[in-house]
Amino acid sequence: MARAVLARDAAADRVVPPAGFTVRLTLLAAAAMAFLAVFALALSLAAGRIASRWGDELARSSTIRISAPAEEADAQTAAAIRVLETTPGILSARALSDAEQQALLEPWFGPDIPIADLPVPRLIEVVETEDGYDGVGLRLRLSAEVPGAVLDDHSRWRRPLVTSAARLRLLGWVSILLIAAATAAMVTLAAHAALAANAKVITVLRLVGATDNYIAGAFVRRFTLRALTGAAVGAVLAVVAVLLLPGDSDGVLTGVGFQGLGWVWPVLVPLLIAMVAFGATQAAARRVLEGLS
């Protein structure tokens, strides 16, 4: 493919019109599809990173909720911390302060929530070791020694995040396939139009001895290079747009972009679109040339 596209043939290049709506259509379609492809990849990769990070953080931490009368809350909180300190697999455990609990509730109830006047349960943050702890055994100990304690190991939060990450990655690949199909359709349409508009020129070329392979090669080369050029422009614009987005990776809608080896994708997208254009133009040229026979 590379040799057929890069091998310059001035005589063959004159077979394909250098300007016209097919040129604009190919360039615009390739640029738009490359832009969308790079953005789709950036969004899916970023969403996957965020979900994976949140899942890892939740997997290493747990919360114990103490629901008890105000006069017993401090005693039960202290008892729960004593249980946690003697439980294998727990790295640390600490009770959240009123200010920390208020900060957790602030997004839902506002900054002026009177937490001291509300029956808000006490929260204990638990950080586990790499080996983790026995959740079943810990729940049994808490139920016996701290009746008002409820252990939340965040498993119900991790599962949706992992599922969402897998679905977002799948959605990204489906988007890429749809973009490739749309690119192939647009390039095929442009190639058909260019070939049909030059039917008389093709007839003359055949009379002077040009083969269908020679004619098809000229169209394939021109349309592939046009698609590559348009896709490169679209990919560069998409990368610039991604770099201009907020870079705070802790947010849900921020931190969109590429990291590490992920930067290979914006480079590969124009090449992949050029390959799609190569195949689509070759197939279209064969069909049209057979129809003109």
Image (spheres, rainbow, N blue to C red):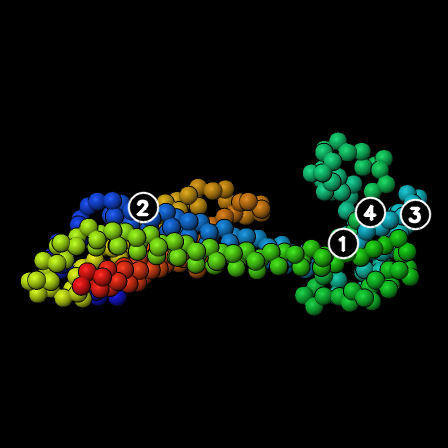
**Coordinates of residue 122 in the picture (x, y in percent):** 82, 47
The answer to whether residue 168 is left or right of residue 151 is: left
Q: Is residue 184 left or right of residue 112?
A: left
* Residue 156: quadrant of the picture: bottom right
Question: Distance of mark 2 from mark 4, alpha carbons?
Answer: 59 Å
Q: Nearer the viewer, mark 2 or mark 3?
A: 2
Residue designated by label 3: 72
Residue 61 vs residue 41, the one in the foreground: 41
Report, in whole angstroms, how far the alpha carbon at label 1 lies from the one at label 3.
19 Å
**In this figure, which residue is indicated by the disc labeled 2?**
28
Identify the image quadrant of residue 4. bottom left
- The residue pinned by badge 4 equals 122
Closer-to-camera residue (81/102): 102
Q: Amino acid at mark 4?
A: Arg
Q: How many marks?
A: 4
- State which quadrant residue 162 falls in: bottom right
Residue where numbered disc 1 is placed: 63
Residue at (75, 31) in percent of width and height: 112
**Residue in view at x 21 percent, y 55 percent:** 195
Decide which of tag 1 and tag 3 comes sooner along the chain: 1
How far from the left and from the top, in percent, is residue 97?
A: 78, 43
Q: Residue at x 81, y 60 (%)?
A: 84
Between the C-alphas of marks 3 and 4, the distance is 11 Å
Q: Is residue 209 visible in the rendered structure shown here?
A: yes
Q: Amino acid at mark 2?
A: Leu
